[in-house]
Image (spheres, rainbow, N blue to C red):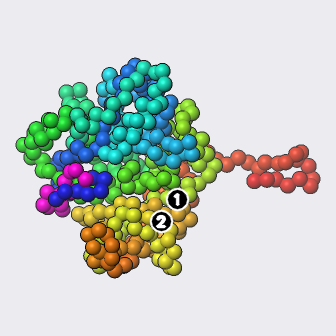
Amino acid sequence: MAATGPDAGVAWHYGDPVAEQRALARGGAVVDQSHLGVVRVAGPDRLRWLNDITSQELAALAPRTSTETLVLSPHGHVEHAASVVDDGEATWLITEADHAAPLAAWLDRMRFMLRVEVADVTGEWAALGEPVAAEGAEDEPLTWWDSWPRVAAGGTRYGPPEGEHPGMQRPWRLVLVPRERLAAEVAVREAAGWRLAGTWATEALRVEAFRPRLAREVDHRSIPHELDWLRTAVHLHKGCYRGQETVARVHNLGRPPRRMVFLHLDGSGHVLPDPGAEVLLGDGGRAVGTLTSVARHHELGPVGLAVVKRNVPEDAELLVVGVIGASPDGTGGERVEVAAAQETVVPGEGVSADRPEARGPVTRGLSAPGHQSLV
């Protein structure tokens, strides 16, 4: 069955989504990810240049070492996200299907007089997903390994420490192959005993791992702190780049206005709300956020990720709006409210694990009787 939305172009499942998900979870499945976009950046100035305009430290990125980076707006909002790996001659950026062309166009506009060449090579290169927790070896095709939720050098975390994070149980990497070799590479893995799995399986395991995704969790207001994305995509101690001021200010002084949560959805009514559904505070029905991802997990049942206001109590019962009996074009149907229990991803206090300690009392003028300290 074909996938829809941001995964259109590949399979949602191949007839048995639960078995596919179990095979992926135990490390025995391959996933067609050929719908993803691929941008190639060549030239001797490429790493220093990418370092200067994106959120990650890339200047000394070694060949076949995986990382990820964000393109932020001047106000620190997430505009693009890319999985990054270099082969020694070019840097490869893997992103969502509808972001490849805009990302390549933005990069091309930023070249100025530097020795870099940018190309959207989605038509020539495709990705395969594998449940493997390792960088690609020298004798393998170029591979990007998802190190989530390990905190990269220069990063920090808002969510659980690595030893308690469910994402540590999700090995995942993307193997880049020439598009004409896609079917042959899948066949090799099937011959080794792996089964084909669809995006039903990958999304369920991604949601379980609290892993943010550009096509789902990000809107025009998103800053990386809200999604715990400072773990892997932001270097806090590198030089200036667009949006860096907001990243530093929120980390050092402020609190992100929203926070990502994991939701256990009530499945008794057999209603699975769609991404984009309103999230309501259970005690009064006030809208406090948006359901961004939803999946049926083979063990946990209906689950989702949502972005809610930071001040929503972490123990509050939430409701997610669903619709029964809508027409194929999405109109009509009966509105229902699905109960949802929260599991904290980004804490309500909005403070990272290594936020600098607040300074001591500050006085205005001389410390003399009659002067009050300003905290």
Q: Residue furthest right?
A: 369
Q: Amino acid at mark 1?
A: Arg
Q: How many marks?
A: 2
SS majority, magenta: loop
298 left or right of 59 in image = left
Residue position for label 2: 289
Which residues are drawn in magenta? 8-19
Q: Residues within 10 Å of mark 1 (few under 14, many from 20)?
A: many
Amino acid carrying label 2: it is Gly
In front of the other: 212 or 49 = 49
Q: Are marks 2 and 1 in contact (CB under 8 Å)?
A: yes
Q: Give SS at disc 1.
A: strand
CA neighbours of label 2 inside 10 A, class few (<14), some (14 to 19), many (20+)? many
- Image location (x, y in percent) of residue 253: 63, 49
Left or right: 348 in relation to 146: right
* Quarter occupied by residue 94: top left
Residue shown at the point (54%, 35%) measured from the top left: 241
- The image shows residue 234, relative to residue 86, as above or below, that is below
**x, y percentage for residue 238?**
53, 33
Regarding residue 115, the answer to whether it shows in the image is yes
Query: What number is the disc on residue 258?
Result: 1
Query: Residue 175: in sight, yes or no?
Result: no
Q: Residue at x 42, y 20 (%)?
A: 115
Q: Relative to 233, does residue 62 appear above or below in the rendering?
A: above
